[in-house]
Amino acid sequence: MAMEDFVTSLDLHTRGGVRAARTNHYLVTGSNIKELRDAVALLGPKRDGRAFGGFTAWALRWTFAARPNGRGFETTRITVAVDAIVTLPRWEMTRSAEGATRTEWNRYVLALADHEAGHVAVATAAADDVAALLHDLQAESPLSLHRKGDRLARERVAIARSEEDAYDVRTRHGLSQGARLGLAQASRLEPESSRCA
Ligand SMILES: [Zn+2]
């Protein structure tokens, strides 16, 4: 396929899909850090029985067509799209909340968003790689081209899932990035580096 097609499909679909990443907010109430932390634990997204402040769910979709190139078949009309939904908390601030609580909440939500952006980055890197893998594909028949392409894409997505697991281990689900409510007030936290190897 022509390089021009490739660039266009990346532009329109990969990056376009990411731009369309949606953010879901769940509302929490509370007038101090402890109440807010309890509300996040209660209302935040759950996975495997564990509550998180934020969460990123994503899926890749890819499509391509086969065309003969004299030696067999190659891919054309490649599209790779990322569907990502980032869930974050939104605090309905109470008038009585102290300035320090507001400051800490804002710091926390930014750190959380930063952590979730790391998950989205894993997904977009996978999308770029899938587009490149599909671009280079060659096979003897349209059927084997599709089988090969789908297998390569699924393998790359599986790698991305393990990269996300490693990212969560490395950052302790964002704790090392500051995604913990009340961190600013916690006085005796050990340095993160000593706790996550
Ligand atoms: Zn995470």
Image (cartoon, helix red, strand yellow):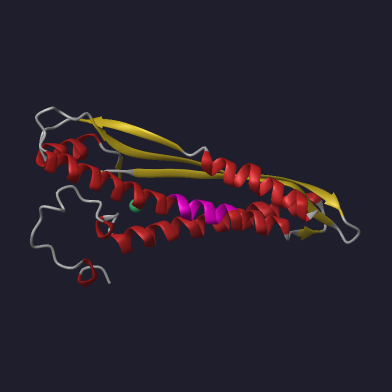
Q: Is residue 73 magenta?
A: no
Task: Identify the residue at image location x=57%, y=52%.
Answer: 127
Which residue is farthest right? 70
In this image, 71 relative to 150: left or right?
A: right
Q: Magenta part mainly helix, strand or loop?
A: helix
Question: Is residue 121 found inside the magenta-colored segment of the image?
Answer: yes
Q: Say above or below: 70 vs 42.
A: below
The reply to whether residue 52 is visible in this rendering is no
**With 173 as the anchor, is 81 left or right in this view?**
right
Q: Seen in the image, is 147 located left or right of residue 108?
A: right
Please state the horizontal and vertical placement of residue 170, each as a whole percent of the image: 32, 64
Residue 140 x/y as whole percent: 82, 58
| Placement of the C terminus among the 4 image quadrants | bottom left
Query: At 80% from the left edge and 50% from the top edge, which residue is drawn?
Result: 142
- Taking the view exactly as shown, the residue that stands out farthest to the front is 99
Q: Where is residue 131 in the image (x, y as percent from the top left)?
A: 65, 54
- In the image, residue 195 sits, relative to residue 43, either above or below, namely below
| Residue 84: image location, x then y, percent | 47, 41
Q: Residue at coordinates 12% horizontally, 43% vertically from top-left?
A: 100
Q: Give the range drawn in magenta.
A: 120-127
Residue 134 found in image quarter: bottom right
In this rendering, the count of numbered labels is 0
Residue at 50 percent of width and 51 percent of height? 123
Above/below status of 197 relative to 148: below
Residue 121 seen from this side: yes
